[in-house]
Image: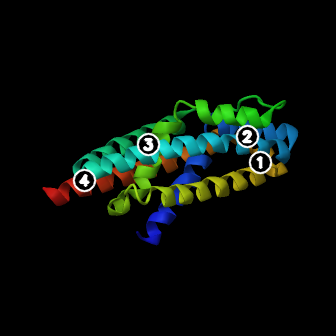
Amino acid sequence: MTNGLYLMTALAGALYVLSPGPAFLALFSLSAAHGRPAGARFVSGHLVGDLFWGTLAFAAIIGVNQLGPMLFDLLGLFCGLYLVWLGVKAVRSKGEVTAPVGAGRPLATGVLFGLTNPKAYPVSVAMFTALTAHYASGLSWDSAPYLMAAAFAGFVAADILLVWMAGLAPVRRFFLRHGRIVTRCVGLMFIAFGTKSLFDATRGFASRA
């Protein structure tokens, strides 16, 4: 297994956490109203959900990869289309900022957000597939614990970055005024990674033609 696979896995974990969604908006709203400590407790709880969905995502990805390259490329094709679809939706969204939630129990609220997000599983599968497809030969059940360790490192690094950013006064003001811009920029990022996944899958089909 190459260091590139570890790096891409950690990057996928970080991007999964950094992508705006209900939890992202809740974190910034909560931190703006109650400071970094509340935000830190929220993301600590949300990490439980990140680990849960990340584990299921790797189980699906490795399982499909072990069945053969054709099915893995089909998964990459589907995931690429899904990421592009999410990106287009984000680019076209109004980027509305939700009201602060979880002020009373940020840790418990974070756990609930992490475990009940209906998009968590498909997004995690899509993100990890898009960034690790080039290293498909290194995806095996034996490598799963090391991959999850790399993903965990990405989760934690992104959480630390988000909590730090959410506590900055200029960021709070910018987020409240320009949430639409943030959402659209990440939408473009989703389109880029979705396109990469489509390219890798297409290249895989072409190599076997």
Which label's residue is closer to the chain start, 3 or 1? 3
Q: Which residue is mark 3?
A: 83
Identity of the residue drawn at 31% across and 56% down: 200
Q: Label 1's element?
A: helix
Label 3: element kind: helix
Tag of residue 27: 2
Relative to 30, residue 73 above or below: below
Image quarter in which the N terminus is found: bottom left
Instruction: Locate residue 2, reporting x and y percent.
Output: 42, 71
x%, y% of residue 66?
A: 29, 51
> Label 3 sits on what residue type?
Leu
Label 1 to label 2: alpha-carbon separation: 7 Å
Pinpoint residue 96: horizontal percent, then vertical percent: 66, 31
Quarter occupied by the C terminus: bottom left
98 and 41: which is toward the camera? 41
* Residue extending furthest toward the bottom: 3
Q: Which mark is residue 166?
A: 1
Give the residue at mark 4.
69
Callout 4: 10 Å neighbours few (<14), some, many (20+)? some
The crowd level at tag 3 (other Cα within 10 Å; few <14, some 14-19, many 20+) is many
Task: Tell me the element at label 4.
Answer: helix
Residue drawn where x is 18% and y is 56% of the image: 206
Q: In whole angstroms, how far apart are the C-alphas of marks 4 and 1? A: 42 Å
Q: Are marks 1 and 2 in contact (CB under 8 Å)?
A: yes
